[in-house]
Image: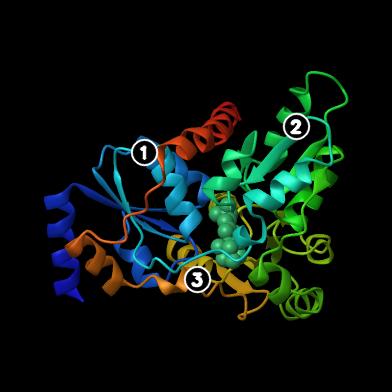
Amino acid sequence: MDEIIEKLNFLKKEKNAVILAHIYQLPEIHDIADFVGDSLDLSRKAAQTDADVIVFCGVHFMAETASILSPNKKVLIPDANAGCPMADMITAEKLRKFKSKYKNPVVVAYVNTSVAVKAESDICCTSSNAVNVVKSAAADKTDGSRDIIFVPDRNLGGYVQQMSGIKMNIGNGFCPTHNNLILPEYVYKAKEEHPQAEVLVHPECRSEVISLADQIMSTGAMCRYVEKSNVKEFIIGTETGILYKLKKDNPDKNFYPISFLSVCPNMKKITIAKVLDVLINMKNIVSVSEDIRQKAYIPILKMLKISAQA
Ligand code: 13P
Ligand code: SF4
């Protein structure tokens, strides 16, 4: 392992590369990354870095967002097949059809979407800023009659609608990991086993799970919340990759997943061997054609501006 890390450090210097990793990545990736964060933090980092090469350890839409924000940098994804099934649940064609049902709608696209879907949208959001983004989209309506479309996640959309009181037309997408593998009966069981623990869940979970939680937050917000809290035990409702970071940053606290089954197989496709491979061979470059990139850049930039104000 030491040899691999030595080689990685050499290549990073030689190529002026930075390794960005999502919180759901394997422990071996957390340990070699220059920065580990949620999807909003990662897009901010990608926009700010002065590296020439970004090795993006996450799923495809995240690397694509980095490439949209930094067209002059080479963005490499260690496994080109690391996709996001939720992002695949809405295509540009499906979105155009959805839009055609309304007169001049405002489209809010979760960042878990393809560049083509973003190019059809007015503003993006992540799980950490979705409520503020939707409030701003509602305030921005030139007249009271513009409908708001929210795609693709029905769970995040439903949660935002409840928190903001703003009525939206929500897509029917979902995350298989959060929606299918984190269930209310598991929450009851975890609470019974750990009655002192606070329950934190991601807004991609189904509403029956969200209603049982003490806090609903993005992965990055969970990490920040736990560090500041005086509570010593937490039940965690999101992808299990977060547990490594939580324990590493808070060795005196205990974390119990609602379910050990809540794994995102795509996030786990990235390994240290693949990181090394793409850096040596400069392969798996994520590229976006310039005309569509320019269109997708606008809703992402709008989101980043709102997040900077929050
Ligand atoms: P975060 O915005 O919390 O990083 O979540 C991204 C994601 O894909 C959750 O499944
Ligand atoms: Fe997509 Fe779900 Fe995996 Fe997140 S956890 S990347 S939403 S499949």
Instruction: Using the image as rendered, state which of residue 287 and residue 194 is in the foreground.
Output: 287
Q: Which residue is mark 2?
A: 135
- Look at label 2 and name its amino acid: Lys
Q: Which residue is mark 1?
A: 70
Q: Which residue is mark 3?
A: 266
Secondary structure found at label 2 = helix
**Could you give the CA–CA distance between mark 3 and mark 2, rounded to whole angstroms?**
32 Å
| Tag 1 and tag 2, C-beta contact below 8 Å | no
**Could you give the CA–CA distance between mark 1 and mark 3, rounded to whole angstroms?**
24 Å
Q: Is mark 3 within 8 Å of ligand 2?
A: yes
* x then y, percent, for residue 64: 44, 50
* x then y, percent, for residue 31: 33, 65
* x then y, percent, for residue 99: 76, 41
Q: Report crowding for label 1: few under 14, some 14 to 19, many 20 or more residues within 10 A (C-alpha).
A: many
In the rendered view, tell whether residue 192 sits above or below residue 307: below
Secondary structure found at label 3 = loop
Colour mapping:
rainbow
Q: Residue at x 42, y 71 (%)?
A: 26
Q: Earlier in the sequence, mark 1 or mark 2?
A: 1
Instruction: Using the image as rendered, state which of residue 98 and residue 18 is in the foreground.
Output: 98
- Look at label 3 and name its amino acid: Asn
- Look at label 1 and name its amino acid: Ser
